Each structure stands twice: as structure tokens, then as C-alpha cells.
Amino acid sequence: MDVLALEADGLLAGLEAQLGLEGRHEDIGIWPRVMDSGEETLPMIDQSLTFFTGAYHLIGDEGKLRRLPLPESVDLAGFYSGRILFTLRDAWEVAGRTFSQGSLLAISAAASQVTGELPGVETVYVPDDRTSISGVTVSRSGLYVILLHNVKGRILRFRVEPDTGKWSSELLPLPANGTVSISAASPHSDTVLVNY
């Protein structure tokens, strides 16, 4: 199974494609992905190793690939403020720290592209034993995390504070009991459509 990295339009006559990533026979599949933060894009290749595991490869200059140094059981959740966001299906112990299952974490995209090493891991949100993350959506106005808390829907909006680089959050003012979801959002717009 081969994935080809092509020029922008990929339709030029006589263009010779380069092999981007050759999968293993046992892989479920390989797909291209472009993550968009509204400020920059991040081209990648997703390699599904099994139904629940995968590897993510950043496409750098001249098609050079760098595998993200993350556990194979993570789910990529978005790209916001220069950070790659992901949730953990399993607890993760790295560099003397333990991150609990279900956590929403972030790493620097730029640092990952340059070194291929794991940059500092930022904790965005850690659900308690009565809360789970049911979705993550990126908008120009923030990072929206949809939660299920005691079977009630909630939405938190996160931002990275420009002066400190730290994450801050606020609970969106929605009625107390109900199911919530985000039906539309774009990293190029402040508008977020919420279903309640």
C-alpha cells in the first residue's frame, strides 16, 4: 500500500510522484490529512495500524516525513494556536509524568516538525470520573470541547492567553439539562453553531 505525496494540484503532465509512505500489509489504511488552525495548515499522513491504533506523520519540507512521537492509541483532535491536540484512550507515562485516560493534551507542531522528538506536553483538560469528552472543535474564537458530565451536555471554550501562553477556559452559558453538540464551526470564522 503506497501513499504518494504530490505537488499542490497533482495534475501536472509529466509530474513524477514521490513515494510518501509505504504501509505494511497488515495496516488498515493510509490517508492524507490537512489540519487547519486558521493561521496555518499542517499536512499529514494518517496510518491506521489497527482499528484502535494509528501513527501520524507530519509532511515537512520536500515531502520529508516525521512520525509524531505519540502513543499509537491517541486520537488527534485538532490543530489550534500552533499546537497539535489529541486525546488519550489509555493512560500515558512519559518523561516522569502520567497523563490519565481521556485527557485532552497538546504539543507544539513546530517543535515536532523540526526535531521529531516529543516536545513539552501541555494539559488542556482532564475529565473527572463523571465527565467525558465527546468532541473537540476549532474555531477562530477558541477551542470548543464538548463534555458529557453526569449525562448532561456542556461546552467549554479554551483559548491560549497571548501574554502567558497558558490555556484558559470558560463554560458556555447553556441550559443546565440537555444534550449538546456543535454542528458547524470553522477555524476561519468566529461563528459556532451549537445544537441543544
Image (spheres, helix red, strand yellow):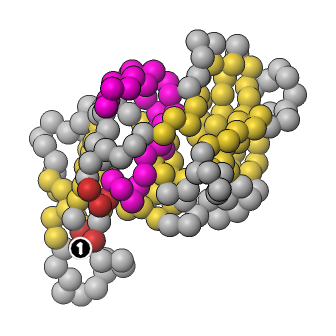
Give the residues in magenta.
85-112
| Above or below for 14 versus 133 | below
Residue at 16% x, 79% y: name it.
16
Residue at 60% x, 45% y: name it.
166
Name the quadrant of the C terminus.
top right
Residue 188, located in which quarter of the rendered image? bottom right
Determine whether the residue tagged by mark 1 lies in a helix, strand or loop: helix
Where residue 104 appears, x then y in whole percent?
52, 34
Residue at 12% x, 41% y: name it.
25
Residue at 32% x, 29% y: name it.
94
Residue 173, located in which quarter of the rendered image? top right
- The residue under label 1 is which amino acid type? Glu
Where residue 157 appears, x then y in whole percent?
70, 42
For mark 1, what is the residue? Answer: 62
The furthest residue to the front: 164
User: Residue 77 vs residue 7: left or right?
Assistant: right
